[in-house]
Image: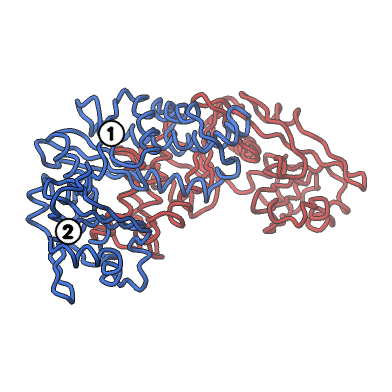
Chain colours: A blue, B red
Amino acid sequence: MNSAGSEPALIGLDWGTSSFRAYLIGADGGVISSVAAPEGILHVEGGNFEAAFGRLVGPWAAEHNVPVIASGMITSRNGWVETPYVGLPSGAAELAAAMTTHTLANGRKIHFVTGMTAETSGAPDVMRGEETQIAGAVAAGGGSGVFVLPGTHSKWVAVEEGKITSFATFMTGDVFGAMRGHTILGALMDEGEGSGAALLRGAQASRDGGLGLLHSLFTARTLPLFGEITKSEAADYLSGLLIGAEVQGARALAGDHGQVVLIGRGDLNTRYAQVLEVFGLKAVEAGDHIVARGHF
Amino acid sequence: MNSAGSEPALIGLDWGTSSFRAYLIGADGGVISSVAAPEGILHVEGGNFEAAFGRLVGPWAAEHNVPVIASGMITSRNGWVETPYVGLPSGAAELAAAMTTHTLANGRKIHFVTGMTAETSGAPDVMRGEETQIAGAVAAGGGSGVFVLPGTHSKWVAVEEGKITSFATFMTGDVFGAMRGHTILGALMDEGEGSGAALLRGAQASRDGGLGLLHSLFTARTLPLFGEITKSEAADYLSGLLIGAEVQGARALAGDHGQVVLIGRGDLNTRYAQVLEVFGLKAVEAGDHIVARGHF
C-alpha cells in the first residue's frame, strides 16, 4: 500500500543481523516512504547504534514527532537494547504491552519490540523480528493460519484468532550455505541457471524419506558423480533436499490447513511454493511491507 | 595380531584422502610391521604417487618380493590409478577378481582394489577403501552382520554369507564440522572436557524425532542460550544429535540384528556405542589392522 497522501503516524525500524529498513508509516497504516541500507547490527561501526540511527533516520525523526518502534535482532544481546522474550500464546496486544522503551541523548524515545519464545519438542525456540512481520500479516490478511518465513533460519508460525500459538525454527539456509561452502558437496557444484527439475527431485527425495537427511545429502555428491544430474543442477537439488526436509519436519504445524502464507523474498518464495506443492500444500503470498503493518 | 615370526607374504596400502598406512603382512595374515604417514592423496606433492610410494614403502618393497595391494581413495579419480566400481552383492572373491594392476617404472606391480557402488533409496551410493576393511572384518569375525564405519562420511554395511548386500553413506562428520565451524551454532560452543550427558540428550532428541533434523539443530543454539546446557556441552549435544540422526536413518539396515560391529577410531567408537544404545542396538568392536586382513 502506498500512502503518500496520508499523515505520518509512526516510524518503524526493521533492523536485522545483515540489513536495515525503516518505514515512515501513515495514519492509515500504509507506508509513506522507506529507507533500506546494508547496515545490519553486525555492520554498525563500534556498535554505535544511536549514531547509525541518526544518520539513517535523523531527517524523518526531526521532521515528524511520531513514535519510533524497532524490531529484529537490534533487540538481541548483540543489538542496541536487549528485550526479554514473551511466551505463547501472544498477539499484537501482548507484544505492544511488553515493549522496552529507550530514551536517546536528545530525549527522543524508541520502543523496542520483544522477542518470542516457544517450547517445541522439549527444547526452547526463539524469534526476534519475525513476530512483528506475523502481526502485520495477521492484520492484513485475517486472524488464523500458518505463516512461513523462508531464510537462513526459516520460521513456521501457527496463528489462531490473532495470536501466535506455536512456532518452530529450521536452519535450512544456514545449512545450505555450510554444505555448499564447507563440505565435500561443493566440489561437484557449478553455478547454474536454476533447475526446477533438480529442485523437485531433491524435494521428492526428502518427502520419500529413505534413510534420512544425513544420507540423502550424500546423494548431492553421487548423482553428479554418476552423471544423473549435472554439476550446475547440483545446488538446486541440494536446495530441494533441504527445503523438502524442512517442510517434511514442519508439516505437522500446518495441521488441517491445506495452505500456508509465505512471507519473504520473491525468488526464495518461488522455490518454497514449488516444494510445498510436492507435499500437497498450497502457498499464498503475503503482501509487501508486512513489517511496517506489524509496527502499526 | 602380531606376526613378527611369520614369513612376509604381502604389502598392503590403505591410502586415503588424508592419511597413508602400509602393512607388511605375514603368511598367516597377521601384521609383521606397519607404517603410518600424514601423506593422504591430497597431500602428495604434485600428485607424484610413485615417488611417495618409493619413499614410504621402498625399503620393504626392495627387501620382500611380495605382491602389493592398494585400497582407499588412492583408487579414485583424484588418486593414482582410478578403478571402476563393482556392484552388489560382492565379497572378497569379487573384489579380488576385479582388481586393476599397475606396473611401476622398475617393473614392480601394484594391484588396486575397486570401489563399490549400491543403489539406495533411488540414488547411487559409493565407497572406496571401506569395502576392504569389511572384507577384513568378515574374515576375522564371521560371515554375516552389520558393520558401521564412523567418520567424515560414515558407512553402514550389511553383509550376508561373506558378501556385502547393501550399504549407505551418512555425512555425519562432515556436517558436524560445517555446522560447528560455519553456521551460527559455533558462536555458543566452547571447548569442553566432553559431556556424556549432553551427547545422550542430543541422541534422544533425534530418536524422538520431533520436527526433524533442520529444526533440532537449532536447539544446539537455544539450549545454551537459555542455560539448559553449558557452552562447553554444546558440541557434545550437537554430536549426539547428528550421530543419533544417522542411527535413526540407518537402523533399517540393521534389520533383525540386535547389534552392529564398529570399525574405527577408539574415541569416536565410544560415542557411537553410547548413541547406539539409545536406539537399543549393541555395539561390538572389530579388531585392529582390519584393512591388512582385508588385503590378505
Tag 1 residue: A285
Q: Left or right: B186 with respect to A168? A: right
Name the residue type under label 1: Glu
- Residue B38: quarter of image: bottom right
Q: Nearer the viewer, residue B118 or A128?
A: A128
Q: Amino acid at mark 2?
A: Ile
Characterize the local packing of mark 2: few (<14), some (14-19) or many (20 or more) Cα atoms within 10 angstroms. many
In percent of the image, x 27 and y 38: which residue is there? Answer: A148
Observer-nearest of A94 and A11:
A11
Residue marked by disc 2: A69
Secondary structure of the residue carrying tag 1 is strand
Does the image show residue B204?
no
- Label 1 chain ID: A
Left or right of B283 on screen, residue A55? left
Measured from the top left, where is residue B1 in percent x and y? 65, 49
**Secondary structure beneath disc 2?**
strand
CA separation, marks 1 and 2?
25 Å
Checking the image for residue A140, the label placed there is none
Q: Are marks 1 and 2 in contact (CB under 8 Å)?
A: no
Residue at image point 25% right, 36% down: A286
Q: Give the x, y percent position of residue B288.
A: 60, 49
Q: Is residue A120 left or right of residue B133?
A: left
Question: Residue visible at 61% across and 40% down?
Answer: B130
Q: Is residue B204 above or below residue B42?
A: above
